[in-house]
Image (cartoon, rainbow, N blue to C red):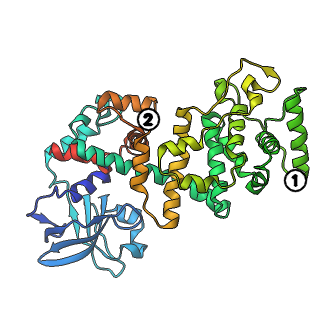
Amino acid sequence: MREDLLYFIWRHNKLPTEQLYTGNGEPIVIRSPGTQNRLAGPDFFNAKVEIDGQLWAGNVEMHLKSSDWYVHHHETDKNYDNVILHVVWEDDIAVFRKDGSQIPTLEVKNYVSKSLLDGYQNLMNKSRTSFINCEKDVRQVDSFLMENWLHRLYIERLEHKSKLIWKLLDTSKNDWEAVLFMLLAKNFGSKVNGPYFLERAQQLDFSIARKTTNEPLQLEALLFGHFGLLQVDECTDSHYVQLKKEYGYLQRKFDLDIPASKPEFFGLRPMNFPTIRISQLVNLYVGNHNFFSELMHLDRLEDIYQAFEICASPYWEDHYTFGKVSKKRVKKLSKNFVDLVIINTILPLKFCYAKHVGRDWNEELIALVSQLSKEDNSIIKNFDKIGPKTQNALESQAKLELYNNYCTKNKCMQCTIGTQLLNRNT
């Protein structure tokens, strides 16, 4: 038994409309369950409940046991002064307000139907599944309801991604251009070097990068040096020596720190080597002083792709590391890579910036992400095995949010899929 089930029972009117009684024998009629509160405070606001012929309007709190009221110290919290009804699975103790008056308690375990309990236990029974709780039944869910739920989940995912953006904005004194640079650095580092690249990007005063955007060699030296790529032992390569010399000058001029560590190469495909990614990042900013403003004004996917139509510097056409010549190849950003940048940086930034300026760009963001190809990973492959095939990046992002923040946490009663399945079977 979980409190989630109590919320479901109350929210979906799964209790009898008559013959409900408090622990003191007073008849109860539920006129309105109110609005569920997912933040701190009572579980339902503005409920209307008739108790012993008297209509009450106020808040409802729920617990597995009524004694949990004291376990959670609600008796000392003024946010619970307006609770008109305590709904519990088991009523094991009387509960009182601060003024000494008793809070009416409704014990529901004897009012819930066996079919509902069986359906809930069946949904939560992990012994019958290998991926998620509802994997055998998810195809029963109405397609229109599923589509709307995925849209909501995608916005939730943007909300989660925006936490980092707001944090970076705070530390950079609301410098949106600097935040874009930090997020791009993280994305260009991918899973292996992303955390390191983000850390180093945060430690770079972005105003220094701004001053070098018109000088490709200086900008390349700055970023290669700052991201720990100019620490090659006994390298006599002329380009490396030139960058090293230039970075030494910048270090002295701007009092730059010396990186304490280096990015990883091991286990990466050559096209993902940090040398290639940093060179591409450099060329993204060469001559580009207002990249953030430019991106915020782009509302067509093809225009965003055009903004990322760049490649690594000529030196890297026949190199992957300093001093070692390889087969010549122009190292452009691939479409798949740009798609990930759009998903993980551009759209979350647009989402936050829209909030910042007081606009609603949700429909525009949904239109953009719906045009991108779905992500290819084990979670999405498993979803495709049990239900409708994932069509685009909106659906793959929404399903990642669903899996990580609902399925793995057994929040079936907070999920539209879980509640519809339980409603259908009870």
For the residue pair 326 and 343, the one nearer the viewer reads as 326
Q: Is residue 94 left or right of residue 378?
A: left
Labelled disc at residue 373 = 2
For the residue pair 71 and 288, the one nearer the viewer reads as 288
Name the residue at 32% across, 33% down. Answer: 126
Name the residue at 38% across, 66% down. Answer: 70
Q: How crowded is mark 2: few (under 14 residues within 10 Å), some or many (20 or more)?
A: some
Q: Quadrant of residue 230?
A: top right
For the residue pair 358 and 27, the one nearer the viewer reads as 358
Q: Quadrant of residue 273?
A: top right
Name the residue at 17% across, 70% down. Answer: 24
Which label's residue is closer to the chain start, 2 or 1? 1
x and y percentages locating residue 270 in the rendered image: 67, 24
Q: Which amino acid does label 2 sit on?
A: Ser
Q: Name the residue under label 1.
A: 255
Q: How crowded is mark 1: few (under 14 residues within 10 Å), some or many (20 or more)?
A: few
Labelled disc at residue 181 = none
x and y percentages locating residue 371 in the rendered image: 41, 41
Q: How far apart are marks 2 and 1 (CA)?
A: 44 Å
Q: Which amino acid does label 1 sit on?
A: Asp
Can residue 47 be seen?
yes
In the image, is residue 247 above or below residue 47?
Answer: above
